[in-house]
């Protein structure tokens, strides 16, 4: 069981990420920010609970879904916005945008834009932590669709052989862009693959903070003790389509609209046409109100700060290819 | 932006590039049930670029989604091609030739040769190239890598008509053909012949005739070059613009014909300068046109950096209409 | 249980492959043939039993170990020798050598020189057979080491999703070149990975003809019935090192010499220093003698035929890149 | 075959190329425990090319075998490099850059850039290139592919001394460096400085001075060019031979200096002609040496076919000493 303080932190981070994302979606719709975010709505609790179970500097290779990964590591909202808006004050000055937010001191190592890269790179990170005796654990977040890349296999096998301190955290939302898992993936549970690497494979409900936290904490203990990697699969819901603006016409039933920025940003309907359950709705309204207090001000302050920053100059495009 | 002039002036049906590709695929699928297309999100969603949108009738039979498994996507095409099918594999971005690197550069390129022609690989790999806003791993123009690879054909349609004609020809080809579809062209329109339309490989097209300078460009750089040519014409400088249409085979004769006339050549491309296609054109001109060239080759290309994400950064790196006007102007001074 | 006729055919093919390989090794040692064969000694029974359970035109992507795959498909010895010797009369006229023997009519489709290619290409072949309704099954032979390539994963997953008529036949000899499976592979049984793709995974003793034949026959029935792929793992022994001439100095104990061409060709010692058991030794000597009758004459005739053929002309090097 | 003349004439210790590479690795491993090397069969076996033979003392700590998982091998190097190690990954054949295509061409090349230099990748990928008898997927010289890829360094040592010096420099470099080790050179010998020896990137070396023609060649083609130069000298033709040493960075100044003197250039390389390194050299010469060139560039390379398996077929495709003599002779007639 997650202690109360931690639970509040997880909920608060997830709520902030959601509210922030909604604001980002608005900024995208007005054209102020380029609309290339993959919305994290529905998956924040799992992401935040997992990171809460790790140390603040445990290295991570994050997934492409949402902003909670960075918020959970206390990266200022302003910084994230500046990356999204290609402004000074972000982490990658227009070169990487929202795909390549980076801050090594916070364990945010960046992302492979081509899916699969994070697995093998994460194995290398874990190898380094092990060899340097840092006591750190590397976590790789990935979607169920990405688990079908060959790199998953190469990394999982070697991580197990070398007992690397690696946590493979699958956010299984049942979709790879427009393709349902049933069409792309031979097993319902990605965790079933763990047996093929002699590592633990655990399925948890991604909306269940205790379950996610517990599984990741156990995996981290195991990894720090030198007992090797774990595969954890959190079943999550992709509430609002693949990208901002995805109307999910590929779902069998027509999407059902909602209200608020989320509705504009995506469809929010299950493949059976039913509205999808939002894990954040389980939070007690009073607690939610309390936790969300001040969020809008923080977000608006970040937006204002972002707006005050200049767009990155074109000279940056020619920098950073090689170490000077 | 200037539209690329059409090849068939009597043709009046105006169609989008993406649609023209679809017409080619649908036409060939109807003609031959062994033509099958697959890739990530090509089914109900119609592909990230919308090329297979509205092709629902083929889903399940000749059109299907794959897992996110690029090695598999290209590898399957190879296996299917060996056994009598005519597969069309879609990679969402042409950067992903490296995600299936072994299958593309080693297997596709060498299987027929290593097995002395006893196995043909009539396969097509379709891919989206170039553009801005997608980041370093989703924005490249990787045609030079393929052009350095014996055993694969490389096709770069610039007009909707060529898109239809080249994709049709690619599907009918018994060799592995890599089709680069430029992201900035999917939404462009132009005249496209109705019904069957096949564009031959290896025949460059003079997109604009002129006497002062030969510009070689394709796809988005061709559009920019044509726009630049208008501006240059207003300044009294008539440039000739050659669209190679296919890079393998490459129509050297057409290039030489033009350069013999103009005496100079500018290559404009959306790829890193070093060992971009322009390098080969430069070397070929040295070898074959040394006597006729009165000015050195110039290359406009991306300086040797990856493609950034921000569009304004991309714009600062990719040759612009202004860059072309300036360079061509200098060359004709 | 394999019927008597089939058993004799399997044994006879395996014995012929061994005897042929020994002769090839001699020709290599005298320099008449370039020495780039990976010796199949120890694995022939598994290879021949597997192929005996399939139809003669079922497509196969063979492994790099030995010549039994082709002999089992009645490819003339002379043809194989000509490929090895880069002479006319082979299948690839010096372009592919022993790595790329090919004869589509016999289901011999060639080989990916880069490991892993056969998996995904095999999936495509199986897809084609399924779609064309040919009733054929594709078999991919591969080593335990190759099972750590990402393509294994991508192909296994999709084959299971699409219920492709594919048999993944792992020849687990415990080695990938110099690297023992314990150092490279997280599981002792590659077949354990089948669960991750919801396909049957069967381990058999590669020296047990009935077991191998039975498993492949069942997998083929399954595949032909539209029930999808299977993973079969045959435990085999690599008797003579990775390549011809491999003295296996990387094994913990010094290699123990034997006699005959095999000894010259490789070490033939287990990692514990004990001599390895040769599965062909289980054959009743009288039966073996009977089956081997005439082998030497056949082999010598093939050698003579090979010698009578001209080395391929250099013009062939410029042919077959594209369809003319 | 003529041995490549050494850079340090006072040095008399004669060492093999493979051994020189090992010296570099061992030296750096002793100097810095964060230097680790891994790959398939590099441990107890010492690598397919014997480079790590006799390095048993490092096994388990700084030297280890990996599974047959090329994506992992390069991907791990990236992750390790991010976190303070200095990894050296060995790929058995340089064709296998495509087996780890995504990691090599997308991740290695763009990670630092996409993340604005906040993460460095001090990694080395060592690979064997060229040669004959290994077949189409194990014999290529893939340096042009890497040279077209901004973000990675490309190193082509031709002498044992350079092998030691460049591998040392590669390990110390904070950028991803791809080291091409030529199969036909592993067994060649030459003088190699004892102890620490670092060869700077980006400085071409004049391997033979001459006035009539500049030949650019590296590795086995350099050896063949040097042998050809002897024959040409006997005919009274003195050619200058330039070894680029590294292809990225490329020493343009050295090339121009030589061509300014000789007025002509021949590139000899062991890769497909189209978009081989020679293409870039041709284009560069057009751009920078147009006025000085009195004869067109010539390229000797593999015609655009894959590398076959049979050695005599390979020999018929790869530029030979005779080819070089003939072409250089023609150019100097
Ligand atoms: C190698 C590669 N193939 C395809 C893509 C395009 N792509 C980006 S996200 C995505 C879907 C990913 O699905 P999943 O891993 O389940 O994550 P989710 O989006 O569901 O969070 C695809 C196909 C890519 N970036 N890289
Ligand atoms: C992608 C790739 N990596 C490495 C090699 C070199 N190689 C050839 S055979 C081999 C070992 C294969 O081991 P395994 O699959 O177990 O088969 P075995 O040799 O034991 O029969 C290696 C590493 C290759 N051909 N392709
Ligand atoms: Mg998903
Ligand atoms: Mg093995």
Image: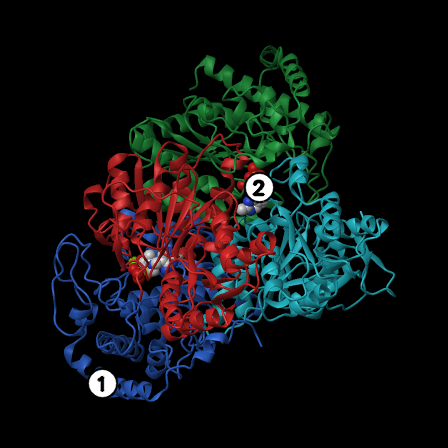
Chain colours: A blue, B red, C green, D cyan
Q: Where is residue D268 in the image (x, y as percent from the top left)?
A: 67, 52
> Label 2: how many residues lie within 10 Å, few (<14), some (14-19) or many (20+)?
many
Q: Position of residue B328 (x, y in %)?
A: 47, 69
Q: Where is residue D210 in the image (x, y as percent from the top left)?
A: 80, 60
Q: Residue under mark 2: which chain is it in?
A: D
Structural distance between the alpha carbons of marks 1 and 2: 62 Å
Look at the numbered discs 1 and 2 and tell me whether their residues touch, using CB distance below 8 Å.
Answer: no
Of A242 and D154, the residue lying toward us: D154
Looking at the rendered structure, which numbered label has been put on residue A296?
1
Q: Residue under mark 1: which chain is it in?
A: A
Local secondary structure at mark 2: loop
Query: Is the residue at mark 1 from the same chain as the one at mark 2?
Result: no
Label 1 vs label 2, nearer the camera? 2
Q: Is C18 placed left or right of B305 in the picture?
A: right
Q: Name the residue under label 2.
A: D136
Please tell me in which quadrant of the rendered image residue A310 appears.
bottom left
> Label 1: how many residues lie within 10 Å, few (<14), some (14-19) or many (20+)?
some
Q: How many marks?
A: 2
Q: Is C197 placed left or right of D135 in the picture?
A: left
Q: Where is residue A123 in the image (x, y as percent from the top left)?
A: 49, 61
Of B305 and B210, the residue lying toward us: B210
Is the residue indicated by label 1 positioned so its CB lies within 8 Å of ligand 1? no
Residue sitting at x 50%, y 24%: C48
Looking at the rendered structure, which numbered label has been put on residue A194?
none
């Amino acid at each position: 069981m997650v202690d109360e303080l931690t639970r509040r932190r997880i909920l608060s981070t997830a709520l902030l990420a959601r509210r922030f994302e909604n604001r980002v979606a608005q900024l995208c719709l007005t054209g102020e920010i380029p609309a290339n975010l993959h919305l994290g709505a529905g998956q924040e609790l799992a992401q935040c609970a997992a990171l809460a179970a790790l140390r603040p500097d445990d290295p991570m290779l994050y997934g492409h879904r949402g902003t909670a990964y960075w918020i959970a590591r206390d990266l200022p909202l302003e910084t994230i916005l500046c990356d999204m808006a290609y402004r000074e004050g972000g982490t990658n000055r227009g070169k990487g945008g929202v795909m390549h937010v980076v801050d090594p001191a916070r364990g945010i190592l960046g992302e492979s834009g081509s899916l699969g890269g994070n697995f093998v790179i994460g194995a290398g990170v874990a190898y380094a932590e092990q060899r340097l005796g840092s006591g750190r654990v590397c976590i790789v977040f990935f979607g169920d669709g990405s688990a079908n890349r060959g790199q998953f296999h190469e990394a999982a096998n070697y991580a197990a052989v070398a007992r690397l301190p690696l946590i493979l955290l699958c956010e299984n939302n049942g979709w790879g862009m427009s393709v349902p898992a049933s069409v792309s993936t031979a097993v319902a549970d990605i965790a079933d693959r763990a047996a093929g690497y002699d590592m633990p494979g655990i399925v948890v409900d991604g909306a269940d903070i205790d379950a996610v936290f517990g599984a990741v904490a156990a995996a981290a203990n195991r990894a720090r003790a030198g007992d090797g990697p774990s595969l954890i699969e959190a079943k999550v819901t992709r509430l609002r389509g693949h990208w901002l603006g995805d109307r999910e016409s590929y779902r069998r039933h027509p999407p059902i609209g909602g209200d608020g920025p989320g509705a504009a940003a995506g469809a929010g309907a299950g493949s059976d046409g039913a509205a999808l359950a939002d894990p954040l709705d389980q939070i007690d309204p009073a607690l939610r109100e309390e936790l969300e207090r001040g969020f809008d001000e923080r977000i608006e302050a970040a937006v204002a700060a972002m707006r005050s920053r200049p767009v990155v100059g074109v000279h940056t495009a020619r920098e950073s290819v090689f170490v000077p | 932006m200037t539209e690329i002039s059409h090849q068939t002036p009597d043709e009046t049906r105006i169609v989008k590039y993406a649609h023209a590709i679809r017409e080619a695929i649908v036409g060939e699928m109807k003609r031959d049930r062994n033509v099958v297309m697959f890739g990530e999100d090509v089914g109900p969603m119609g592909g990230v670029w919308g090329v297979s949108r509205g092709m629902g009738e083929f889903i399940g039979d000749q059109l299907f989604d794959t897992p996110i498994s690029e090695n598999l996507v290209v590898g399957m095409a190879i296996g299917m091609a060996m056994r009598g099918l005519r597969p069309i594999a879609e990679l969402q971005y042409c950067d992903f030739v490296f995600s299936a690197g072994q299958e593309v550069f080693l297997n596709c390129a060498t299987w027929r040769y290593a097995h002395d022609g006893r196995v043909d690989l009539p396969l097509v790999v379709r891919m989206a190239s170039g553009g801005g806003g997608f980041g370093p791993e989703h924005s490249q123009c990787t045609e030079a890598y393929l052009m350095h690879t014996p055993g694969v054909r490389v096709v770069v349609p610039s007009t909707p008509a060529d898109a239809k004609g080249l994709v049709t020809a690619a599907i009918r080809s018994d060799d592995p053909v890599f089709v680069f579809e430029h992201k900035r062209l999917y939404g462009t329109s132009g005249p496209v012949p109705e019904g069957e339309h096949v564009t031959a490989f290896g025949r460059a097209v003079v997109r604009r005739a002129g006497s002062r300078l030969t510009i070689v460009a394709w796809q988005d750089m061709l559009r920019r070059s044509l726009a630049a040519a208008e501006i240059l014409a207003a300044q009294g400088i008539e440039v000739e613009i050659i669209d190679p249409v296919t890079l393998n085979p490459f129509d050297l004769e057409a290039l030489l014909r033009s350069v013999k006339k103009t005496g100079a050549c500018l290559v404009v491309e959306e790829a890193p300068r070093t060992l971009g296609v322009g390098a080969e054109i430069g070397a070929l001109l040295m070898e074959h046109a040394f006597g006729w060239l009165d000015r050195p080759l110039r290359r406009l290309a991306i300086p040797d950096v990856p493609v950034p994400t921000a569009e304004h950064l991309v714009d600062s790196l990719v040759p612009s209409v202004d860059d072309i006007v300036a360079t061509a102007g200098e060359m004709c001074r």
